[in-house]
Amino acid sequence: MAILVLCDHDGAAYGSATLNAIAAAAQIGGDVDVLVAGHNVGDIASQAAKADGVARVLCADSAELANGLAENIAPVILAIADNYSHILAPATTYGKNIMPRVAALKDVAQISDIIEVIDASTFKRPIYAGNAIATVKSDEAVKLITVRSTSFEAVGETGSAAIESASAAGDAGLSSFVKSELSSSERPELTSAGIVVSGGRGMQDGSNFTMLEGVADKLGAAVGASRAAVDAGFVPNDYQVGQTGKVVAPDLYIAVGISGAIQHLAGMKDSKVIVAINKDDEAPIFQVADYGLVADLFDAVPELDKAL
């Protein structure tokens, strides 16, 4: 039994969620190969080769693969799919973009967002915004799976796998890359940060997020937000934590002015320690918080900032 893991990358940097997907593959059992598809991705392939438990890295390097277009990368995977019993990818934007197309063209049912491996054909995944956990079994010849990275401990990087070339399939001509607009910040990236400070509708205005940014900077933390805060225009949508945003599991999650709707909890309830600040003592966030402070955030946050 051989397993293929699709490497998550942006063309310049290696996505750490790949290490979590490799950990899931190791639990399934069998030889693990990693596919790096892109343009001028030799350095990324070299980094992938260091992941523990990887037998081989396949590097498909071609200009049409440069921007991660699913229409061009899917044929690369399909060309080698029959060599594998399982094909995994992290449940990131990159993996979620490519894997459904592969599953459709391969005519198999994808298993999305797994959080636990029971055996080679049985997996657990959250449904209903995490309110229930479904145990699903697949009898597909090739199992297409996306992995929730926060549920698997990343493998180490002490390996030295062989790197081999894989063939690209050419430009499918179905889509083209126009441009990318990325926000930049000196703070840690939200999904990889060890500490996250998030604000909700209770922040009342986008300008009030400067309070959270001051705390975050002192803690070396990332800043997040609930969907309510994003929808209200307080902060950009790349701050959003939750079912329809980013899933995070930091060592410390501080929720400020967030009531705790189930959609938000789905994105952060696996955090190691959860601290909630809310003036409503009936707020659902307190049901999952390890530490809860019933207080007006406009008093509590400046006090916290001063104490830090």
Image: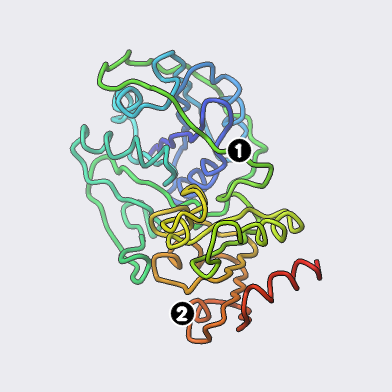
Q: Indicate the secondary structure of the residue bearing disc 2.
A: helix
Of the pair 9 and 177, the residue shown nearer to us: 177
Disc marking residue 235? none
Using residue 161 as the reference point, say whether residue 83 is left or right of it: left
Residue 181 placement (x, y as % from top left): 49, 32
Using residue 164 as the reference point, say whether residue 276 is left or right of it: right
Of labels 1 and 2, the one closer to you: 1
Q: Which of pointers 1 and 2 lies earlier in the amino acid sequence?
A: 1
Tell me which amino acid carries mark 1. Ser
Residue 303 placement (x, y as % from top left): 75, 73
* Identity of the residue drawn at 56% across and 81% down: 279
Tell me which amino acid carries mark 2. Pro
Of the pair 52 and 190, the residue shown nearer to us: 190
Using residue 12 as the reference point, say whether residue 103 is left or right of it: left
Q: What residue did someone put label 1 on?
A: 184
* Identity of the residue drawn at 74% across and 58% down: 219
